[in-house]
Image: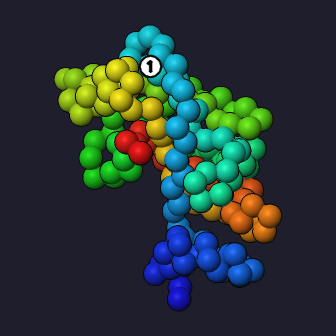
Amino acid sequence: MDKQTLSYAEWRKSAENGSRQAAPSQVFKLVTPDVQVMDDRCIKFTVTTGNPDRERDVVMSSGVDLGPFMKSPVITWAHDYKALPIGRAVSVEMLPNSIQMVIQFATADLNPMADQVFRMVLAGYLRATSIGFRPLEWSYNEERRGVDFQKVELLEVACVPI
């Protein structure tokens, strides 16, 4: 099966079995940390950590290439590439075990959905983000039974409901 038709679940299973088959062109990983409200419609999110996720996978923040993302640092709603962005990253901080971003949400006159998402974050109904990335280097961690993504190319960041 080639990488265009290989689902993430199928690829992950092949990695578990020791295959070095090419990874899918994009993978999504979720993090649900506390958020910090700032000013000027800005909220600071931790968008990824070095902690295992639900699938026991880890994205090592030290191996995240921000270059492609920083060319157009827009934030989407739930990875919807057809919709207008809901915000933009105005700052990015690389920490030893995480990446934090200050996201500025678009105003209601620019994008009513962005304003709704912003107000839902403020009210505590939304707090999760998810990164979309292209895997570059990875290995399967037998002990944890998950994939360790040592190098990835960050493609996008989304606010997500789950």
**Numbered marks: total:** 1
Q: Residue furthest bottom?
A: 1
Residue behind mark 1: 42
- At 61% across and 41% down in the image, what residue appears? 48
Horizontal and vertical percent for residue 43? Answer: 47, 22
Which quadrant of the figure has residue 13?
bottom right
The answer to whether residue 111 of the structure is visible from this angle is no
Horizontal and vertical percent for residue 84? Answer: 28, 42
- Residue 120 sits above or below residue 75 on the image: above
- Residue 39 sits above or below residue 77 on the image: above
Q: Secondary structure at mark 1?
A: strand
Identity, as a three-letter code, of the amino acid under mark 1? Cys
- Residue 118 sits above or below residue 38 on the image: below
- At 68% across and 37% down in the image, what residue appears? 98
Horizontal and vertical percent for residue 71? Answer: 52, 42
Viewer-side residue, 10 vs 27: 10
Q: Is residue 82 left or right of residue 140?
A: left
Q: Is residue 122 left or right of residue 47?
A: left
Please identify the quadrant where the C terminus is shown. Answer: top left
Horizontal and vertical percent for residue 128? Answer: 46, 38
Q: Residue furthest top?
A: 39
Is disc 1 surrounded by few (<14), some (14 to 19) or many (20+) residues within 10 Å? many
Q: Is residue 15 left or right of residue 121?
A: right
- At 20% across and 29% down in the image, what residue appears? 112
- At 50% across and 79% down in the image, what residue appears? 6
Viewer-side residue, 22 vs 130: 130
- Residue 143 sits above or below residue 132 on the image: below
Q: Is residue 155 left or right of residue 148?
A: left
Q: Residue furthest right?
A: 143
Specify the color scheme: rainbow
